[in-house]
Image (tube, rainbow, N blue to C red):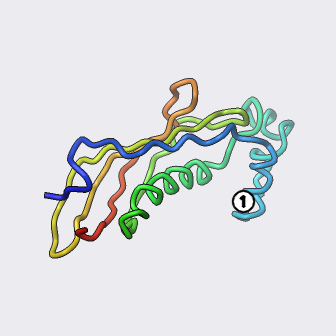
């Protein structure tokens, strides 16, 4: 059995600082997603969103950061992860990413770890949920 991870183990949580409008503008430039619902309140309100919303892929990137932070100390690597977007993230929201190990498979000198992953806002709203698989070598 893998001494680094156990079924049911929670991954270290990642808590991001409050989302800012400046961050959304910067992410728009980095990602090439210039949809004004992410940067212009008037446009987002007119679209029925009540104000700007964060890019879904930004929230997904936070989850990816949590997984990377988990596997990096063990020279592991992320093999796959995917999420479903469930609620909108807005400026001022604090996003907390978490995960739980659901399966471990030993193959040769490597362990393949599957986990459920999700992110919530400070209000408890689940904004993304999905799964991930990563590999860590035997230590």
For this view, does 12 lie left or right of residue 135? right
Instruction: Looking at this view, name the residue that lies furthest to the bottom.
Output: 108
Instruction: Between residue 34 and residue 92, name the one nearer to us.
Output: 92
Instruction: Looking at this view, name the residue that lies furthest to the top.
Output: 123
Rendered image quadrant of residue 75: bottom left
Residue 2 visible to an observer of this rendering = yes
Residue 132, how many percent across, how many down?
36, 56
Q: Residue at x 28, y 47 (%)?
A: 101
Residue 124, how many percent across, how many down?
51, 26
The residue singled out by tag 1 in the image is 33
For this view, does 20 lie left or right of residue 72? right
Q: Residue at x 37, y 46 (%)?
A: 11
Q: Quadrant of the N terminus?
A: bottom left
* Depicted 30 relative to depicted 38: above or below: below
Q: Residue at x 73, y 32 (%)?
A: 48
In this rendering, the count of numbered labels is 1
């Amino acid at each position: 059995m893998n001494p680094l991870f156990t079924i049911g183990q929670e991954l270290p949580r990642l808590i991001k600082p409050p989302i800012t409008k400046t961050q959304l503008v910067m992410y728009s430039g980095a990602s090439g997603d210039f949809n004004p619902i992410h940067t212009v309140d008037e446009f987002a309100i007119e679209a029925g969103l009540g104000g700007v919303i964060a890019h879904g892929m930004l929230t997904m990137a936070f989850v990816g950061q949590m997984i990377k932070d988990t596997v990096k100390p063990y020279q592991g690597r992320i093999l796959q992860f995917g999420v479903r977007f469930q609620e909108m993230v807005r400026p001022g929201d604090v996003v907390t990413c978490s995960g739980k190990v659901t399966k471990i498979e030993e193959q040769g000198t490597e362990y393949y770890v599957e986990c459920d992953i999700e992110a919530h806002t400070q209000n408890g709203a689940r904004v993304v949920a999905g799964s991930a698989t990563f590999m860590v070598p035997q230590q």
